[in-house]
Image (cartoon, rainbow, N blue to C red):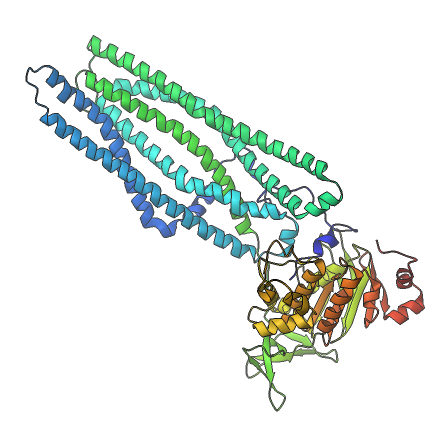
Amino acid sequence: MEGSGERREKMSGPGRPMRGPMRGPGHGPGRMMAPPGMKIEKGTVRRLLSYMAGYKFRLIFVVICILISAAASVASSLFLQSLIDDYIMPLLLTSAPVFTPLLHAIGKIVCIFAAGALSSFLYTRTMAVVSQGTLKVIRDEMFSHMQTLPVRYFDSRTHGDVMSYYTNDADTLRQMLSQSLPQLFSSIVSMIAVLFSMIHLSIWLTLVVLAFAALMLVVIKNVAGRSGSYFVKQQRSIGDVNGYIEEMINGQKVVKVFCHEEKAKEVFDRKNEELFQAAASANTYANVLMPIMGNMGYILYVAVAIIGGALGIMGVTNLSLGGEPVLTLGTIASFLTLSRNFVNPIAQISQQLNAVVMAMAGATRIFDLLDESPEEDHGTVTLVNVQQGEDGTLSSCREHTGKWAWKVPDGVKRMNDDGEIVIAENSPEGFTLVPMRGKINLNHVDFGYEEEHPVLHDITIYAEPGQKIALVGATGAGKTTITNLINRFYDIDDGKIRYDGIHINKIRKEDLRRSLGVVLQDVNLFTGSVMDNIRYGRLDASDEECIAAARLANADGFIRMLPDGYDTILEGDGSGLSQGQRQLISIARAAVADPPVMILDEATSSIDTRTEAIVQRGMDNLMKGRTVFVIAHRLSTIQNADVIMVMDQGRIIERGNHEHLMEEKGRYYQLYTGAFELE
């Protein structure tokens, strides 16, 4: 497909839903962004952890390394007591000090330090692998699921909005998995280990530290709580800004043509200001937290030193698990270090929780995307290549033969040329091969993008094999909507659409769309060679088939004049080519698919008259022997149509060939003679 003209159709005219204000990432139907200050949902955490299940042995290794690192940190603090009381103080009281025991003790603690440092390095490196591997799985699943979503989903969201799932939201997850979660767990383990170590040294001083820690938690709750709410606002604003930037980049030519630069900057400044306010507030509260905690830690340090010294001087009995009767100099020095090691993780936990909340907001949006209902497809009729035997019987085959048939399972109803319903039952193969002819009938079709706003009313069209059906009418009359219903981008509300007598709801969507070639006004070319872009129509097509399709589309001449011919690399949606050249490549793309039915949606409306004549010759070659639906504003291009249907406000008001409609002197006559203009 060359994109979708549907959005143009929907943007104007009665009953068409406007896209409305830009939404933040993850705002789907029936799903609302969690309000500021959102709580982390257990389901989101559990679901995220399920993606890490494949790394459970590495995660166990990370946990072991974190435990070793925390133990090494606590051991270094406790060593300070032994260093002072058992080694340094005795050395000060002897006339012939022996330093060998001290050196042995220092050697042991160096080994412990080394083990802690190595453990920290190993778990940090391991978590980098785990986080990137987890994100790869999530991105793969996101992209795969996105391919299954209906066109309606993308019509209601900006491209930048969708892109933010893969960039901003995924990056917040990466930071959480690789940094925040390990540090969070490490801080919790360290706090527990330090708490038991402090109780081991002195219960009195431990109570002092816990009382001060309670005061710190009050401060953290006020500061970090505000920070978390602003981080959620920041995520939403980033999606809004990304969506707007993407729209402006795609429409930069239109912005410049209409001198809309100042207005575009004004809107961007407003959106960017909202992002700035949210980000500045979030980071202000987050950044002041550590300095506040650091200064409170210094106050605690002084308080512990004063209280510990006073208790030691007064000879107050020390309560501890270690059994020390009094507070020694070594005990106080060691406790001072432990108190700092207990306070710092509290601040780190509060800071990492903000990152976790922000990442969970991103994860919620990602899971909202993954939870979007995929395009439903209950079709059982498939499309197969066939070859015809000498006796006229059809048999399916793998190779491309240019002949197609519908593989209709037993029990599926279809209508024959006499209008009779046929049901195959108990056939030898369990299915019937029905030759694909390209006959499409719409019987009394009603449709609306929203139930309360119908767009099409009682549409009836009979397209016989090989006929050229033209649809004309003002913008918003419903022309493109009809072609999108044939493609089953949307399902009808009432009536029937039959393809070779088979209800299209019974045909598998992939096979239905494979039988339809579409050439649109808006051409989408992809990064790659010209040959690759043509082969996009049928991936198993050979180079010779692609070149033959280009010749059929009248594109071979200009392609061979490109720097590298068919191997010329196109970038930026083929910006180096003219509109006519891009359109010819899109026609060649449709031609290589060799479908029995073609849909041409205003394919020449954006090119000049001379180029149109070249493109028209390519399309005429493409239309030979096929059923064709043509949507055109230039009535000169459809004079040879077998049937012309004039539409107005979702209804067919006139039908017939050019001569018949001119004789009636109705709306078509007025359009053709200029008495009435398409709007």
77 w.r.t. 570: above or below: above
Q: Nearer the viewer, residue 84 or 52?
A: 84
- At x 66%, y 44%, the residue is 248
- Residue 58 horizontal side relative to residue 429, left or right: left
User: Which quadrant of the structure image shows residue 332?
Assistant: top left
Q: Position of residue 173 (x, y in %)?
A: 46, 42
Q: Position of residue 217 (x, y in %)?
A: 41, 24
Residue 37 appears in the picture as rendered = no
Quarter that holds the N terminus: bottom right
User: Which quadrant of the structure image shows residue 648?
Assistant: bottom right
Residue 16 appears in the picture as rendered = yes
Spot the residue most to the bottom: 391
- At x 65%, y 74%, the residue is 413
Spot the residue most to the top: 314
Q: Position of residue 40 (x, y in %)?
A: 47, 38
Spot the residue most to the left: 96
174 w.r.t. 498: above or below: above
- At x 56%, y 57%, the residue is 147
Q: Position of residue 549 (x, y in %)?
A: 65, 72
